[in-house]
Image (cartoon, rainbow, N blue to C red):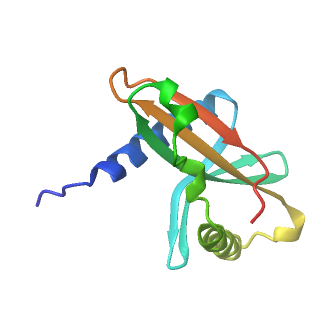
Amino acid sequence: MVIIMAEHNKIGKIGEEIAVKYLLGKKFNIVERNYLCKIGEIDIISHENDSLIFIEVKSKKVKTFLEIKNLDYKPEDNMSYKKKLRMKRAIRHYLSFKKIDEYKKNIEVVLVVVFIEEITKKAKIKIYRNIIL
């Protein structure tokens, strides 16, 4: 059986791999990836001291990095109210499933935006910390 992946899904997977390498280079301790439950998905979960960091990755292919400034649509725009609500519920599910007392942990939500240049395949990354859910 051959599974054909849509172009935006390919870009998303590539972007997530780039984000993981970047975060590891920044000393993030990644404990889990692609946590999936019936409520939603968490792309990356990291642990730092007494904090749990839940990371959403958004990726976008661009012709050149110069295009980033003039985009009508930015990947971070996909962090809609509905997406934040699903993520919040998925985080609660994760904490419950793992039997983690959310009041004994600092919880941070981070958005990582990965721009992938079409020709060179190079990437630029933006990180938005402390996203409010």
Q: Which quarter of the figure has residue 63?
A: top left
Direction top: furthest residue: 120
Q: Is residue 101 above or below residue 4?
A: below
| For residue 122, side relative to residue 131 (left or right) | left
Which residue is most to the bottom? 38
Which residue is at a point 66% across and 76% down the rendered structure image?
89
The residue at 40%/46% (across/down) is 13
Residue sitting farthest toward the left:
1
Indicate whether 25 appears above or below 108.
above
Q: Nearer the viewer, residue 7 or 2?
A: 7
Q: Residue 16 location in percent, x, y?
A: 48, 44
Give left or right: position of 31 versus 120.
Answer: right
- In percent of width and height, residue 35 lies at 53, 63
Quadrant of image for the N terminus: bottom left
**Residue 38, percent across and down?**
50, 79
Closest to the observer: 96 or 65?
65
Residue placed at 59% from the left, 55% from the top?
77
Residue 77 visible in rendering: yes
Question: Residue 124: image x %, image y %?
Answer: 54, 28
Q: Quadrant of the C terminus?
A: bottom right
Q: Residue furthest right?
A: 104
Q: Is residue 91 left or right of residue 78?
A: right
Name which residue lies at 68% across and 29% down: 26
Q: How many marks?
A: 0
From this viewpoint, is residue 43 visible?
Answer: no
